[in-house]
Amino acid sequence: MFIVTQIRNESKRIEEWVKYHNHIIGVEKFIIYDDHSNDETLSILNELSKKYHIITFSTNKNGHYLDSNNPNVYGTIDLHNRILNS
């Protein structure tokens, strides 16, 4: 089983999220699109990839956000378009 997701600045919870989805849900492969994180998210994913099968794609620019005050809110923009924007 695999999971595809998009993240940004998730350093506080990405390790717990990966472990939960691997150990509890049974996800074996993670495909993660990083939307220009400017915290330690990518470093943490790099360390986690030594133990878990994680493929990370990253961008050097921000995607299109619905609410510029809260970059984690995408509203009605579907995942496919969010990934394309990243």
Image (spheres, rainbow, N blue to C red):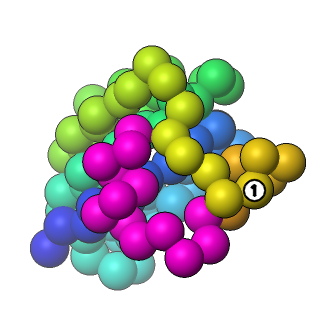
Q: How dense is the environment of label 1, judged by Cα within 10 Å: few (below 14), some, or many (20 and up)?
A: few
Residue lying furthest right: 69
Does residue 25 appear left or right of residue 74 in this picture? left
Residue 13 in view (yes/no): no
Camera-nearest residue between 79 and 30: 79
Q: Is residue 40 above or below residue 19?
A: above
Does residue 16 appear left or right of residue 54 in this picture? right
Q: Position of residue 46 (x, y in %)?
A: 37, 26
Residue 61 in view (yes/no): yes
Secondary structure category for the residue under label 1:
loop
Report the residue marked by disc 1. 67
Q: Which residues are magenta?
A: 74-86
Q: Residue at x 52, y 60 (%)?
A: 17
Q: Residue at x 25, y 43 (%)?
A: 54
Q: Position of residue 71 (x, y in %)?
A: 70, 48
Q: Is residue 84 magenta?
A: yes
